[in-house]
């Protein structure tokens, strides 16, 4: 519980499917009426194929904050990955939170589900007993599938009870969809001398297909043959004749789940199983009732409007993706997102998504969400390019306001690219329009591709910069190399206002350091001189490693020689005081300013400056006092 509201977590895939949508909307309203709020954790797919994207999708269930959650409902009939179901149950039970499932029986959980056997038996009994049918054929689903075999056994029980012959030859398998069903019905014209009195189908989709195939053969339904279905899907009202079926009402199921959840939260004892019996719906395909008239104009108008809206939003999504790929960083991405209406949505990304130096195809953590995430979009509180921080346990930056001022569910999806978690999205629709639920999956898939592609492009830019740096820079000192100087020199020459300054620095005693202290210390001394030169020169200077222990700086314009030399030697002095070396680093420096007319031959300018540097080196030798053992010598 949080902010005085009971929190129920619902784990369910594909919220845009009508049956799932009906369940969510009814359950959300029922829980809200009882002082609670529903939080939906969803995936765009049903996790059946176990492909790479699904690995990232299912991390959404790691977002569940068990510290504020009072009960967890798992639509395990819709989630096709059993390992995911088992993991959610295991984690929830570890937090001593009640679990309600909709299909399977699990130890310590309460199952609330449809009694499909009882419902299907109603259809079979209606056909065989009420209509007096003695010759019938069953089109089952997938052979050896639990759902299918459950309905086959229901037919066997009723047939045996009514003493009506029914054997394996009276069963075909339509695999729960149209093409295999059409093939199965066509085979009946070959296998049997006469068609049966009735064809009982294991679901409505197969029943609709059966009616259509019979019509092609001029077989009338129900005058010549009865056809029935099961499930009660919306499509049956568009079939002519409308299908007799058994309604598996998701609204009825959701109400039963809500009652169960509230009793569990209250600590009441509850049976391990609560079954909801589907309701027999007699209609025209068995001849019991005329079909219900539908307003074709109204239905067609709705379908057309939905299609045009989908087309328009799809176009917007593609344009948005192009604009995202044109951004330089996620701050600009956030500004692009601000230009679109996303129907009450927040986007939180993992820390590594903001870092262009991290390969987007590399997992950087054992947990899918970083402890602090980057909030880049908030519909109701525009960030205008600002990136805030949020903890994943907080779920929403305005959680109290959202839970207390609105009774609609919060809906969470994980963002991923090629199975690598990137963050999550939370929707808070202020109505139950199914079009918004359709758009949610559309947005998720678009942003997965857009953010993944954007991160890939940014990482490619980073790699190109690193490659260019390797090409342009000396690997030891990270100063520019001669190739980089050749490419950059014309641009620097254009910046000069009449003059150019050349600085040449040479490390004293490199051979002595290498011979007595090793090449690692020799490299340390070379880098020290390079750092001193870089520090002493202005930012617009080009600093180059010219040779083994020689460094050159090219500075547009003139520069006070005394200040440059002072900064250079001060840096070396401070380093010697803190480096804790047995030797002291020393360098000789030459500085000379040239006019632009003299700057046509760079090599000559370096040689002229080199003479000054060697004069300095000779002067130091001539005036050097006797040096103690262990110090630098030339």
Image: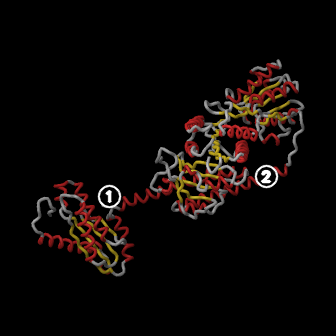
Q: Nearer the viewer, residue 435 or 634?
A: 435
Residue named by callout 1: 475
Residue pictured at 68% horizontal, 40% vertical: 262
Q: Is residue 322 above or below residue 590?
A: above
Tell me the CA gap for discs 1 and 2: 66 Å
Quadrant (top left, top right, bottom left, bottom right) of the C terminus:
bottom left
Q: Is residue 425 above or below residue 601?
A: above
Does the rendering let one see residue 522?
Answer: yes
Residue 508 image offset from top left, x and y in percent: 19, 65
Q: Nearer the viewer, residue 146 or 256?
A: 256
Secondary element under disc 1, as helix, strand or loop, is loop
Question: Which picture quadrant has residue 263?
Answer: top right
Q: Which of marks 1 and 2 is in front?
A: 2
Kindly identify which numbered label has been placed on residue 350.
none
Residue 61 image offset from top left, x and y in percent: 58, 43
Residue named by callout 2: 302
Using residue 262 as the reference point, say whether residue 346 is left or right of it. Answer: left
Tell me, what colour scheme is on the image? secondary structure
Q: Which of 334 and 456 is in front in this view?
A: 334
Does the rendering let one see residue 53?
Answer: no
First along the sequence among labels 1 and 2: 2
Q: Could you classify mark 2 by the number of other residues whose Cα lies within 10 Å: few (under 14), some (14-19), or many (20 or more)?
A: few
Residue 608 image offset from top left, x and y in percent: 23, 75
**Number of callouts in the render?**
2
């Amino acid at each position: 519980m949080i902010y005085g509201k009971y929190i129920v977590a619902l784990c369910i895939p594909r919220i845009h499917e009508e049956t799932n949508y009906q369940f969510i909307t009814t359950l959300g309203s029922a829980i809200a009426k009882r002082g609670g709020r529903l939080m939906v954790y969803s995936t765009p797919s049903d996790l059946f194929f176990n492909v790479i994207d699904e690995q990232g999708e299912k991390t959404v269930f790691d977002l569940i904050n068990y510290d504020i959650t009072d009960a967890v409902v798992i639509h395990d009939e819709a989630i096709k990955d059993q390992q995911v179901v088992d993991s959610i149950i295991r984690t929830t039970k570890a937090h001593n939170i009640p679990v309600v499932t909709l299909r399977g029986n699990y130890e310590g959980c309460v199952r609330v589900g449809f009694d499909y056997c009882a419902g299907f038996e109603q259809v079979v009994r209606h056909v065989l007993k009420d209509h007096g049918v003695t010759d019938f054929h069953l089109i089952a689903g997938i052979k050896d599938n639990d759902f299918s075999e459950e309905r086959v056994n229901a037919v066997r029980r009723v047939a045996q009870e009514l003493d009506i012959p029914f054997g394996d030859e009276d069963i075909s398998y339509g695999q729960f969809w149209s093409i295999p069903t059409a093939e199965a019905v066509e085979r009946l014209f070959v296998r049997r001398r006469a068609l049966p009195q009735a064809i009982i189908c294991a679901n409505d989709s197969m029943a609709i297909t059966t009616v259509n195939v019979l019509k092609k053969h001029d077989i009338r339904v129900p005058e010549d043959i009865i056809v029935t279905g099961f499930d009660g899907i919306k499509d049956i009202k568009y079939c002519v004749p409308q299908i007799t079926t058994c309604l598996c009402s998701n609204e009825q199921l959701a109400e039963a789940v809500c009652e169960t959840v509230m009793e569990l939260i209250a600590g009441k004892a509850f049976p391990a199983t609560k079954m909801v019996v589907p309701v027999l719906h007699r209609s025209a395909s068995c001849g019991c009732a005329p079909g219900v008239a539908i307003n074709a104009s109204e239905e067609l108008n709705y379908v057309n409007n939905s299609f045009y809206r989908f087309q328009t939003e799809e176009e917007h999504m593609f344009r948005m993706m192009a604009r995202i790929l044109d951004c330089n960083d996620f701050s600009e991405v956030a500004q692009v997102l601000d230009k679109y209406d996303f129907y009450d949505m927040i986007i939180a990304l993992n820390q590594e998504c903001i870092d262009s130096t991290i390969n987007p195809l590399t997992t950087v953590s054992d947990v899918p969400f970083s402890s602090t995430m980057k909030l880049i979009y908030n519909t109701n509180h525009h960030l205008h390019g600002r990136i805030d921080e949020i903890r994943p346990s907080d779920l929403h930056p305005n959680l109290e306001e959202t839970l207390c001022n609105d009774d609609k569910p919060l809906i969470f999806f994980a963002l991923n690219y090629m199975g690598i978690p990137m963050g999550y999205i939370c929707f808070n629709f202020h109505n139950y329009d199914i079009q918004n639920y359709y758009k949610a999956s559309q947005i998720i898939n678009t942003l997965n591709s857009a953010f993944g592609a954007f991160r890939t492009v940014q990482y490619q830019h980073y790699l190109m910069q690193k490659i260019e740096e390797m090409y342009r820079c000396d690997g030891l000192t990270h100063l520019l190399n001669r190739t980089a100087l050749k490419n950059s020199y014309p641009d620097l020459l254009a910046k000069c206002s009449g003059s150019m300054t050349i600085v040449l620095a040479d490390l004293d005693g490199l051979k002595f350091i290498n011979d007595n202290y090793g090449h690692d210390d020799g490299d340390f001394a070379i880098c020290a001189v390079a750092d001193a030169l870089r520090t002493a020169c202005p930012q617009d200077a080009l600093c180059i490693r010219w040779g083994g222990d020689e460094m050159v700086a090219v500075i547009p314009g003139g520069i006070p020689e005394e200040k440059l030399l002072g900064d250079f030697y001060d840096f070396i002095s401070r380093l010697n005081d803190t480096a804790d070396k047995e030797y002291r680093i020393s360098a000789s420096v030459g500085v000379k300013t040239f006019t632009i007319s003299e700057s046509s031959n760079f090599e000559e300018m370096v040689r002229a400056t080199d003479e000054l540097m060697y004069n300095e080196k000779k002067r130091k030798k001539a005036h050097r006092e006797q040096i103690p053992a262990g110090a630098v010598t030339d």
